[in-house]
Image: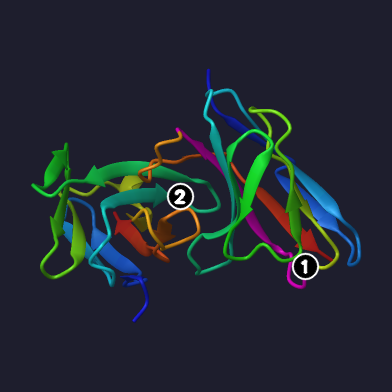
């Protein structure tokens, strides 16, 4: 079955550590996205990529980095520069002609101790 | 005024009742509209797109009012399984989120037996 796989589902890290969240899709989608969701808040865009080897900052990119070396993969690194990293992170993908229909992974819940 | 606004609720509704909630958007240039459903601690999933003429999918009816800049979702004969948070999503090619999408914070619906 086609879909988006995020890992790990739950992650704990100490302050000052970088952590990388994995996102893989086999939907043959060109576009991929990373969102962050905090309790009671809407989804906020961190980074997105419309094509391999190209990506753009979203609304809250500071303290995060991404790469898009393969169409299927769009990993997100949460660096120590991110001041409030504890959140629910959602990866999504879509066809290039985005009109709003996104397919989401199950999410990764990061807790900084 | 926030770009996309929703009443956070919670809406407590008895099973079998009809419930409706709205979402207002501030930018008249918005082009596409969607309702997503998000279960507790899960990823959002597309519930339905919202068309200008209104559209129905089983017990769910979505409507768009461009003049007043709101979209609505009506759920008839509500089921316990309808309990979830309903996210309003607005798309426009210029602006909104960096990818053109703006998510509302969601309306929390609780169906009570």
Residue B59 percent coordinates (x, y):
17, 42
Magenta stretch in the rendered image: A83-95
> Where's the C terminus of chain A, which quadrant?
bottom right
The answer to if A86 sits in the magenta stretch is yes
Q: Determine the chain carrying the residue at label 2.
A: B
Please name whichever residue, B16 or A70, is drawn nearer the observer in this view of the structure: A70
Give the number of the disc on residue A82: 1
Work out whether A78 lies above or below A91.
Answer: below
- Mark 1 vs mark 2: in front: 1
What residue does disc 2 label?
A: B39
Q: Is residue B61 rendered to the left or right of residue A85?
A: left
Please name whichever residue, B12 or B35, is drawn nearer the observer in this view of the structure: B35
Residue at image x 53%, y 47%?
B42
Please name whichever residue, B102 or B42, is drawn nearer the observer in this view of the structure: B102
Q: Is residue A14 rendered to the left or right of residue B14?
A: right
Residue at image x 52%, y 24%?
A27
Choose top left, top right, bottom left or bottom right for residue B85. bottom left
Prevalent SS, magenta region:
strand
State the separation of the CA atoms marked 1 and 2.
27 Å
Q: Is residue B26 rendered to the left or right of residue B2?
A: left
Q: Residues within 10 Å of mark 1 (few under 14, many from 20)?
A: some
């Amino acid at each position: 079955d086609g879909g988006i796989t995020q890992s790990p589902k739950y992650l704990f890290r100490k302050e000052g550590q970088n952590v990388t969240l994995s996102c893989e899709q086999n939907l043959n989608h060109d576009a991929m996205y990373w969102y962050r969701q905090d309790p009671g808040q809407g989804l906020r865009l961190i980074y997105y990529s419309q094509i391999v080897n190209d990506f753009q900052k979203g609304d809250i990119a500071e303290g995060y980095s991404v790469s898009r070396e393969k169409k299927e993969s769009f990993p997100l690194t949460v660096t120590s520069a991110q001041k409030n990293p504890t959140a629910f992170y959602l990866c999504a993908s879509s066809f290039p002609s985005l009109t709003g229909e996104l397919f989401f992974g199950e999410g990764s819940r990061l807790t900084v101790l | 005024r926030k770009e996309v606004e929703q009443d956070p609720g919670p809406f407590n509704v008895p099973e079998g009742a009809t419930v409706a909630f709205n979402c207002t958007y501030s930018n008249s240039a918005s082009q596409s509209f969607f309702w997503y459903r998000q279960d507790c601690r899960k990823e959002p999933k597309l519930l339905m797109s919202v068309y200008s003429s209104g559209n129905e999918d089983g017990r769910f009816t979505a409507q768009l009012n461009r003049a007043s800049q709101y979209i609505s979702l009506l759920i008839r004969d509500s089921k316990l399984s309808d309990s979830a948070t309903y996210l309003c999503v607005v798309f426009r090619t210029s602006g909104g989120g960096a990818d053109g999408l703006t998510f509302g914070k969601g309306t929390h619906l609780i169906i009570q037996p």
